[in-house]
Amino acid sequence: MDEGESVGQTRRAHGVRRHIVAAVLTCSAVGAAAVHVIKPDLKIDGITVVLLAVAAVPWLGDLFDSIELPGGAKFQYAQLVHRIEASEERTVRIGRAVDGASRTARVALVAAGGSDTEEPTASAAADAVERLAAEYVRVRETQGRGSARTHRMERIFTDLLAVTPHVADFDIDAALAAEDPGIRLAAYARLYAVPDGTKVSALVATVVDEQLNFSQFWGLQAIDALVDAQGVDQTPLGVVRQLRALLRELPPTTDRAGVVQSILARFAVDSA
């Protein structure tokens, strides 16, 4: 489950709990009124009242922003809840950013470690791309979600980074339009390794519609590389609009949202 969905479910649960507490308190008040009518001579001392108030205090936060008891003791609820939720969201967002940075660093480290290997021929590189694309699809279909699958897919992407630049006739447009997610990932790897600013619009159009989170993350990284290579002033305005629209759709705590925010921040700084 995505972290953004988890936060949303927590808030919905809070709303349900609020209605339940309100109903319980209302029924309790009605019951107390009924007892008073039936037995008007029934006496309740001050200690009992205080104990009942203390027992109710933890639940009243679901209904009131603050409660002030005799003697000046004041309980602030809404502000505390909001601060806790904001803190949790910031923690999740930072965690996602760290995960994204760690993922990029791992791929860069592996790629650097393999830089001394012999360069493949164009034909061998093309065969390797097809093999790696098929392996990516197989891994996604046969392995359950988890760190093991993610690390394996990272290794596949790293290998694609190494071989795609050696495919002389790599058709980026066709690869971006491919239904095969492995071929699309190969296109992202090619543009990440060898940025081509003329393909930024086609790349963005594909990445915005990308349904696989892992692939979309690296597609966004490729967009970042293209913007960096050609410069903000050479990037079409439509790209910015599409990225802003994508950001509104992405859960804010995902690493993908972090990459989009990082790209858009460049345009904000440039226009300042």
Image (spheres, grey):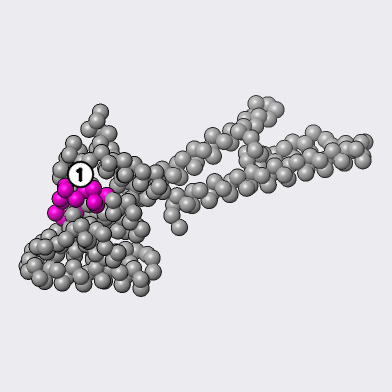
Q: Amino acid at mark 1?
A: Val
Instruction: Tell me where residue 167 appears, x and y as whole percent.
Output: 11, 64
Look at the picture and state if 69 lies above or below 98: above
- Using the rendered image of the protein, determine whether residue 57 is visible from the camera's viewpoint: yes
Pick the residue in front: 12 or 84. 12
Task: Give the tally of numbered discs.
Answer: 1
The part of the image, by quadrant, that contains residue 230 is top left
Q: Residue at x 68, y 30 (%)?
A: 69
State the predominant SS element of the stretch in magenta: helix
Location of residue 151 by image quarter: bottom left
Q: Residue at x 58, y 36 (%)?
A: 77
Q: Residue at x 12, y 60 (%)?
A: 165
Position of 196 with respect to 141 (left or right) is: left
| Left or right of residue 200: residue 85 | right
Q: Which residues are magenta?
A: 192-204
Residue in the picture at 66% in, 44% down: 19
Q: Compared to 77, does 95 lie above or below?
A: below
Quarter of the picture containing the C terminus is: top left
Identify which residue, 90 or 127, lies in the foreground.
Answer: 127
- Within 10 Å of the Cα at label 1, are there few (<14), some (14-19), or many (20+) other Cα atoms? many
Residue 257 percent across, percent down from the top left: 35, 47
Q: Is residue 98 shown in magenta?
A: no
The image shows residue 142 at horizontal and vertical percentages of 35, 73
Q: Which residue is mark 1?
A: 227
Q: Tell whether 161 sits left or right of 151.
A: left
- Badge 1 marks a residue whose secondary structure is helix
Q: Is residue 200 magenta?
A: yes
Pinpoint residue 171: horizontal percent, then vertical percent: 16, 61
> Compared with residue 69, is residue 258 higher up or lower down, i.e. above or below?
below
Q: Is residue 192 above or below residue 29?
A: below
